[in-house]
């Protein structure tokens, strides 16, 4: 492994942060990892935007709204290697299960007609990102270089993938590490 | 309705093999297949209701929901687009007051696109309640709209609308022969059936549908099989866009075709024959029935034909809008009253075909040629053509030429000769063999019509330099996705993915990796599909990508990636519901 | 004494007349990936995962008869890469959200994907709107997960002596349909003990109230590979 630290950025789009939690399951291996890795934009650092020279971008979650698109593009622009992490990033996952219901029905149910809704109104603040008709996996919006399946991928998956990359090997996951659930 | 259906089933001896025929009658009368009809039919035909539902869902001309009393379909093949199909159908829709694909609120009329109806030499064509209408212009459309709105019965419409011309422009060896009414049978019986088979063998006649299997071998295999019944089938499901020669042969040479079938039957020992006529050729049905009746009267069909002790008869079965039924085993499935899904092979139809019995399936043109060979002998035929492709080939020529129509050439004729004859100038290229064939560019016109060079079932579509090849690729990709039977994964999913991928590139949303993705998809469909449809579905892309890579490259944006769906449009619902139109409520398709 | 043989990936494999390549391979302990094939029923040949090269030509191993002189390749990078893409086609065609599927870990579609090293779905998703039929007291259909293998159709006809299922529609419009007047499973002849209720290789047909009896992590393919599992099951089934 080289001395220069590898810059890693992470983000959760339409995800549940479960993949990030699983990443933290690296536990004491995180200590070893940070000897070789510097975290850039990430919920772990609170850095708000990617540096222009990120090496690896780990993205959890699919693309469900306009902000997701902007963030994903920022990552693609600034990261040499972009990785779709977890089921939602790879195929839309649970959020994409809304895809067979029209967006109008979804919003009406949540904000207008649903049980217990008070002050019924579909949110329209300009600060809020608008929802896309359907939730899309990352590879349908930008080019993705690697995919780490799992819901979430286990800490071992992150470890194997990152250590492979850091060692200059083509990352590969053995059978036990490939899970879609 | 109950009585009608009961009677219909009875007329068909309660045979489930007649399901398509029965459903055609129900569709014609009720403009759809009512649920009650399905429930009534299933037990009396002794089939599960799901078989009926499958058939209705599979064939384009059957519907679960009512179509209009006048159901109008407009052919949307590439040759139709060349004469302004899109504009004309939009005009039609506007005048009728109906949306394309829908039924007018009063239930009187419905309008939709349909796959090529085999009238490319008299475009724009379509179907009204299944009957062919040709040469549609705005003036003609106006008249039709008037008839529809007056609810004038079809029989009272101007006969001109329904006029289908033969357009035989260039006759050769076969088309110069008079229709045969017994001569071939007599010659075959006098010469001896075995000897006649030898003449067929000497003639080198290969199947005219495109695949080119040797006719004599098929006869031989089918006759060798140990079976108490054998069948002879004429494939008149001429669905390849751009081909219409079978239409002409059946209109003007039906006697010869039937006689070819009868000679075949005599040799292989079949007593029953079928002609599977594509639904789009409904206009030929009555005429063909009358010819069959004449032949029965002349003892050329029926019992003890020509007092030679063999029986044979032919039944006409109409298709219902499915290109895949041109594939011989799918055609057999369809004849059995089922959906047209190609069978696993082996066994081949010559061993196990209709109802599991040895069956010879040949193209209209093949039987036409066989009948003539039975009279004139194998040498007569083999004197024309090339070493591997004997005799002549009948072409259906359409597109950018002065004289669209039927042309007959000896195999080995160059494309240039054909182009000169049909008055094609300023030619960009020719689609030989229809969408499943090959697109050849204007530096290849020295190539020859022959199984060993450019094999073709007869479709020959000319494109001049004003045309955009990608429009054709777009049209053909949609065609295959629409016509895929859906049996196997690579074709079912692949042709739909290919359609999307072609749309993406043609509509200008392609980027760096999209050509690679396109090629990858093409290879998967081609190499892994179950039948000829899938194996050739990528040909329009593959043959043009090979010849015009720059045409595709030029469509690409100089960026690394663009989404395959419209991002900003994807926000439209949310914008409307939030009543927003600010800058943040929009997305650029690609990063600025 | 049977001395007829074919060659699969360089290995001599004996066969008997009438056997398919798949049957001969399975009997010899060679796994050929497949989804629509099950040795108990008439081969279908539709998923195309079992495509092998027979003397250079692609053939479906489950339907193609074995015959003398066949030199077959099964495990090659080219074939497995293409099998992976065909599997990905199935994943984008339906709506396969493994984390929320009861069948996860016991699903052949998923296991074949694992076997082929698939980590993503590669193609754009169709996200087609498909229904769930939960009308039957004991069995449910989630159409989102149907891959049109017809195993339920065949099992119902050939094993249960019924005709509960059919695949309807053309092309990408294909759908599993149920043989009942209402079209609902509850009004069909299906019984929870029918073979057809248990044969689905994915999570499209599920037995209610059994889904989580075995926890995720302890399921068939969580640790075992589909090749071993299949050869153990289907090899045995051939011997019966």
Image (cartoon, rainbow, N blue to C red):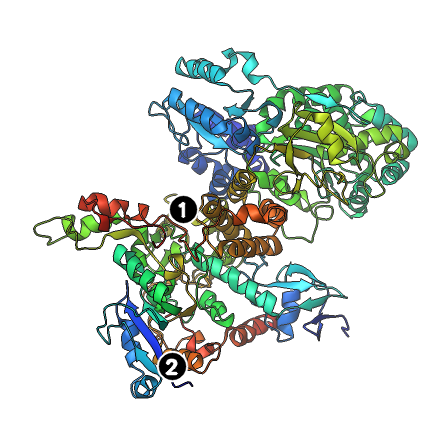
- The image quarter in which residue A31 lies: bottom left
Q: Is residue B141 above or below residue C232?
A: above
Q: Does dot 2 land on a helix, a strand or a loop?
A: helix
Is residue C68 among the parts visible in the rendering? yes
Q: Does dot 1 land on a helix, a strand or a loop?
A: loop
Residue in the image at 79% along x and 38% along y: B269
- The image quarter in which residue A95 lies: bottom left
Q: Nearer the viewer, mark 2 or mark 1?
A: 2
Q: Quadrant of the C terminus of chain B?
A: bottom left
User: As drawn, is C115 to the left or to the right of C239?
Assistant: left
Q: How many marks?
A: 2
Residue in front for this viewpoint, C53 or B224: C53
Place of residue B456 in the rendered image (x, y in percent of width and height, measured from the top left):
70, 39
**Residue C180: numbered disc:** 1
Q: Is residue A167 above or below residue C186?
A: below
Residue in the image at 58% along x and 38% along y: B323
* Chain letter of the residue beneath label 2 in the structure image: A
Place of residue B61 in the rendered image (x, y in percent of width and height, measured from the top left):
50, 33
Place of residue B129 in the rendered image (x, y in percent of width and height, measured from the top left):
50, 24
**Residue A159: numbered disc:** 2
User: As drawn, is B410 to the left or to the right of A165?
Assistant: right
Is residue C38 among the parts visible in the rendering? no
Residue in front for this viewpoint, B228 or B286: B286
């Amino acid at each position: 492994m080289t001395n220069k630290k590898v810059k890693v950025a992470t983000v959760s789009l339409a995800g549940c942060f479960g993949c990030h939690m699983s990443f933290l399951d690296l536990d004491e291996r995180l200590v070893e990892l940070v000897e070789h890795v510097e975290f850039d934009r990430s919920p772990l650092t609170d850095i708000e935007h990617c540096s222009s020279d990120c090496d690896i971008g780990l993205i959890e979650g699919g693309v469900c709204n306009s902000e997701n698109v902007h963030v994903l593009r920022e990552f693609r622009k600034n990261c040499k290697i972009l990785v779709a992490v977890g089921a939602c990033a790879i195929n839309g996952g649970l959020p994409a299960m809304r895809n067979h219901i029209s967006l109008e029905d979804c919003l009406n149910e949540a904000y207008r007609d649903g049980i217990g809704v008070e002050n019924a109104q579909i949110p329209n603040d300009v600060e809020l990102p608008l929802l896309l008709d359907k939730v899309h996996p990352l590879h349908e919006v930008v080019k993705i270089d690697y995919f780490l399946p799992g819901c979430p991928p286990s800490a071992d998956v992150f470890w194997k993938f990152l250590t492979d990359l850091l060692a200059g090997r083509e990352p590969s996951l053995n059978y036990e590490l490939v899970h879609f659930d | 309705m109950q009585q009608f259906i009961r009677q219909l089933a009875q007329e068909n001896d309660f045979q489930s093999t007649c399901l398509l025929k029965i459903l055609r009658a129900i569709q014609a009368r009720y403009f759809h297949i009512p649920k009650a009809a399905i429930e009534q039919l299933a037990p009396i035909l002794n089939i599960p209701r799901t078989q009926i539902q499958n058939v209705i869902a599979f064939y384009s001309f059957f519907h679960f929901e009512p179509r209009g009393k006048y159901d109008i379909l407009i052919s949307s093949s590439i040759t139709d687009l060349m004469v302004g199909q899109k504009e004309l159908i939009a005009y039609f829709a506007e005048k009728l007051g109906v949306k394309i694909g829908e039924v007018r609120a009063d239930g009187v009329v419905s309008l939709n696109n349909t796959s090529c109806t085999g009238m490319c030499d008299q475009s724009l064509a379509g179907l009204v309640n299944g009957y062919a209408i040709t040469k549609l212009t705005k003036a003609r459309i106006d008249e039709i709209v008037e008839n529809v709105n007056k609810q004038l019965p079809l029989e009272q419409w101007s006969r001109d609308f329904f006029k289908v011309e033969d357009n035989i422009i260039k006759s050769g060896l076969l088309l110069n022969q008079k229709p045969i009414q017994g001569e071939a049978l007599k010659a075959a019986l006098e010469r001896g059936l075995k000897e006649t088979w030898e003449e067929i063998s000497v003639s080198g006649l290969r199947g005219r549908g495109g695949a080119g299997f040797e006719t004599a071998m098929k006869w031989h295999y089918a006759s060798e099989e140990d079976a108490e019944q054998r069948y002879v089938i004429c494939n008149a499901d001429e669905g390849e866009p751009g081909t219409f020669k079978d239409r002409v042969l059946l209109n003007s040479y039906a006697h010869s075709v039937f006689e070819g079938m009868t000679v075949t039957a005599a040799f292989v020992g079949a007593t029953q024959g079928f002609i599977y006529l594509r639904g789009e050729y409904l206009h030929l049905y009555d005429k063909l029935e009358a010819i069959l009746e004449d032949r029965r009267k002349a003892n050329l069909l029926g019992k003890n034909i020509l007092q030679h002790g063999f029986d044979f008869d032919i039944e006409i079965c109409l298709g219902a809008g499915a290109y895949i039924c041109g594939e011989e085993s799918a055609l057999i499935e369809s004849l059995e009253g089922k959906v047209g899904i190609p069978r696993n092979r082996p066994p081949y139809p010559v061993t196990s075909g209709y109802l599991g019995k040895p069956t010879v399936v040949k193209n209209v043109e093949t039987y036409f040629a066989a009948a003539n060979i039975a009279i004139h002998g194998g040498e007569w035929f083999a004197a024309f053509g090339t070493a591997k492709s004997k005799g002549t080939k009948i072409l259906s020529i359409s597109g950018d030429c002065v004289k669209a129509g039927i042309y007959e050439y000896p195999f080995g004729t160059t494309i240039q000769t054909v182009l000169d004859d049909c008055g094609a100038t300023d030619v960009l290229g020719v689609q030989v063999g229809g969408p499943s064939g090959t697109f050849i560019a204007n530096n290849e016109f020295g190539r020859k019509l022959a199984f060993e060079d450019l094999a073709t079932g007869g479709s020959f579509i000319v494109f001049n330099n004003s045309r955009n090849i990608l429009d054709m690729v777009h049209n053909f990709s949609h065609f295959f996705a629409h016509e895929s039977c859906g049996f196997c994964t690579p074709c079912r999913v692949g042709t739909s993915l290919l359609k999307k991928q072609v749309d993406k590139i043609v509509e200008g949303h392609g980027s760096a990796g999209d050509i690679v993705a396109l090629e990858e998809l093409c290879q998967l469909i081609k190499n892994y599909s179950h039948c000829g449809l899938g194996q050739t579905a990528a040909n329009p892309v593959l043959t043009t990508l090979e010849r015009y890579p720059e045409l595709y490259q030029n469509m690409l944006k100089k960026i690394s990636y663009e989404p395959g769906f419209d991002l900003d449009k994807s926000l439209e619902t949310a914008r409307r519901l939030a009543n927003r139109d600010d800058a943040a409520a929009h997305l650029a398709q690609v990063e600025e | 004494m049977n001395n007829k043989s074919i060659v699969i990936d360089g290995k001599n494999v004996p066969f008997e007349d009438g056997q398919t390549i798949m049957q001969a391979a399975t009997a010899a302990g060679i796994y050929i990936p497949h989804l629509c094939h099950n040795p108990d029923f008439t081969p279908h040949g539709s998923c195309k995962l079992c495509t092998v090269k027979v003397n250079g030509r692609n053939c479906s191993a489950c339907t193609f008869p074995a015959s003398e002189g066949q030199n077959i390749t099964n495990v090659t990078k080219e074939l497995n890469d293409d099998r992976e893409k065909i599997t990905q086609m199935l994943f984008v065609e339906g709506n396969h959200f493994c984390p929320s599927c009861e069948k996860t870990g016991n699903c052949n579609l998923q296991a074949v994907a694992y076997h082929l090293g698939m980590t993503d779905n590669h193609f754009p998703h169709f996200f087609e709107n498909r229904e769930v039929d939960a009308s039957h007291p004991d069995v449910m259909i989630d159409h989102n997960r149907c891959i049109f293998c017809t195993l339920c159709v065949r099992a119902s006809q050939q094993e249960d002596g019924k005709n509960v299922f059919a695949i309807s529609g053309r092309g990408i419009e294909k759908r599993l349909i149920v043989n009942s007047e209402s079209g609902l499973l509850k009004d069909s002849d299906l019984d929870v003990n029918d073979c057809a209720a248990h044969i689905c290789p994915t999570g499209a047909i599920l037995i209610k109230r059994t889904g989580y009896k075995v926890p995720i992590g302890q399921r068939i393919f969580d640790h075992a590979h589909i090749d071993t599992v299949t050869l153990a099951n289907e090899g045995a089934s051939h011997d019966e």
